[in-house]
Image (tube, rainbow, N blue to C red):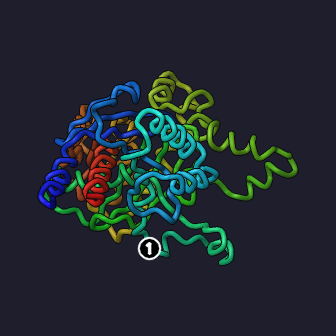
């Protein structure tokens, strides 16, 4: 009997896993095989009879979840509770969970949390300078996000360079943006905080703003909470700066045609990203490599070049031709650069699939 169970456990990791990634700007479905190859699907029903289990990327797990966990009513309730903090992310994930449970049943569905990778951030980096009772009673602290993407880049970067990387800064630049300091494979600081709204400007999210400005909008201008929340989440960032789009591709085209607001949008974006990389380098005590990943990081040579130009004082130097023609998973730094600069394809789905397989193994 023991031998039979062991064979079942060994066979499970090789079966395909459906990864459901309900983010703030899109719903991505990938079927990840045991050999780590993935197939993009257009609907969940395509995975019927093919997936052994389903992994859901959950953006905000709060302080409770540090490991992947099988979904049940208690876990779903906790995810729902954190939707107040991450409404653009957790609410779509809950809708996806509901749909998946209708299609596939309640078994073999696993939640994998973006916040988990950042559980190693030390107190000096996750503690806000607010009243102690707020921190202890309400759990206000920095959590950090994009952990699944960061985990993959932290694994992939040393493999690409063929050596360990002690001090690594990962720039996840997509619809949401965050900059993370990774020391010897562990997260030690990051720009996103209690919610995915903090940090550098994003496609439609503001990033960090002076809290007093929010009070000012409430009084004397009497904007409602709904108006303020919508403004910060959906009308700010690159969209708010450019006045027409949160898509870097659109903004670059407009800049080339002489649009001053588009030029300002990119200037603010680059300024904040470069400043964040410098801050993360301080948390690391130096800098050995930078990773650009996610939609903008992988595809905008202009953003990469301008960020790196601002970081030249740290010894960052990229090959302009290589940067312009960069393929994914490559080093675009010059030979003489003191810091390696990598462009890495985001593979959050692979990290989720691996986590789900581990849960299956542990469940035996």
Depicted 48 relative to depicted 230: above or below: above
In the image, farthest residue toward the front: 1
- Locate the N terminus and report the quarter of the image it occupies: bottom left
Q: Position of residue 118 (x, y in %)?
A: 42, 63
Please say whether residue 237 is visible from this viewpoint.
Answer: yes
Q: Nearer the viewer, residue 58 or 76?
A: 76
The reply, left or right, for residue 20 in relation to residue 258 is left
Please say whether residue 268 is visible from this viewpoint.
Answer: no
Q: Quadrant of residue 106?
A: top left
Q: Position of residue 225 (x, y in %)?
A: 76, 47
Instruction: Give the residue number, with chain letter if any, for mark 1.
Output: 122
The reply, left or right, for residue 307 in relation to residue 33 is right
SS for callout 1:
loop
Question: Residue at position x 52%, y 50% from top?
Answer: 200
- Locate the C terminus and report the quarter of the image it occupies: bottom left
In the image, farthest residue toward the top: 257
């Amino acid at each position: 009997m023991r031998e039979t169970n062991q064979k079942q456990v060994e066979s499970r990791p090789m079966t395909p896993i459906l990864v459901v990634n309900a983010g703030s700007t899109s719903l991505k479905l990938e079927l990840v095989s045991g050999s780590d190859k993935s197939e993009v699907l257009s609907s969940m029903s395509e995975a019927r009879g093919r997936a052994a289990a389903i992994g859901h990327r959950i953006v905000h797990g709060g302080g409770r979840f540090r490991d992947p966990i099988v979904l049940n009513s208690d876990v779903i309730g906790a995810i729902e509770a954190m939707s107040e903090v991450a409404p653009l992310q957790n609410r779509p994930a809950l809708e996806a969970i509901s749909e998946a449970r209708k299609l596939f049943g309640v078994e073999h569905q696993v939640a994998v949390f973006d916040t988990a990778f950042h559980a190693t951030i030390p107190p000096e980096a996750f503690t806000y300078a607010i009243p102690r009772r707020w921190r202890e009673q309400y759990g206000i602290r920095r959590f950090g996000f994009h952990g699944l993407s960061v985990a993959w880049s932290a694994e992939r970067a040393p493999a690409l360079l063929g050596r360990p990387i002690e001090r690594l800064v990962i720039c996840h630049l997509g619809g949401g943006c965050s900059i993370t300091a990774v020391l010897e494979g562990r997260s030690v600081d990051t720009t996103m905080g209690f919610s995915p709204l903090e940090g550098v400007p994003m496609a439609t999210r503001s990033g960090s703003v002076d809290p007093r400005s929010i009070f000012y909008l409430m009084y004397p201008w009497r904007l409602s909470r709904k108006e303020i929340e919508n403004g910060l989440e959906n009308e700010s960032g690159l969209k708010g700066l450019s006045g027409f789009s949160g898509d870097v591709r659109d903004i670059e085209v407009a800049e080339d045609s002489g649009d001053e607001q588009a030029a300002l949008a990119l200037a603010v974006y680059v300024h904040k990203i470069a400043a964040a990389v410098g801050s993360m380098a301080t948390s690391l005590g130096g800098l050995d490599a930078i990773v650009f990943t996610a939609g903008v990081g992988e595809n905008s040579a202009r953003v990469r070049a301008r960020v790196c130009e601002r970081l030249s004082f740290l010894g960052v130097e990229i090959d302009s031709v290589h940067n312009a023609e960069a393929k994914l998973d490559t080093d675009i730094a010059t030979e003489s650069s003191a810091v390696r600069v990598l462009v890495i394809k985001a593979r959050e789905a692979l990290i989720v699939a691996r986590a789900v397989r581990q849960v299956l193994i542990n469940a035996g």
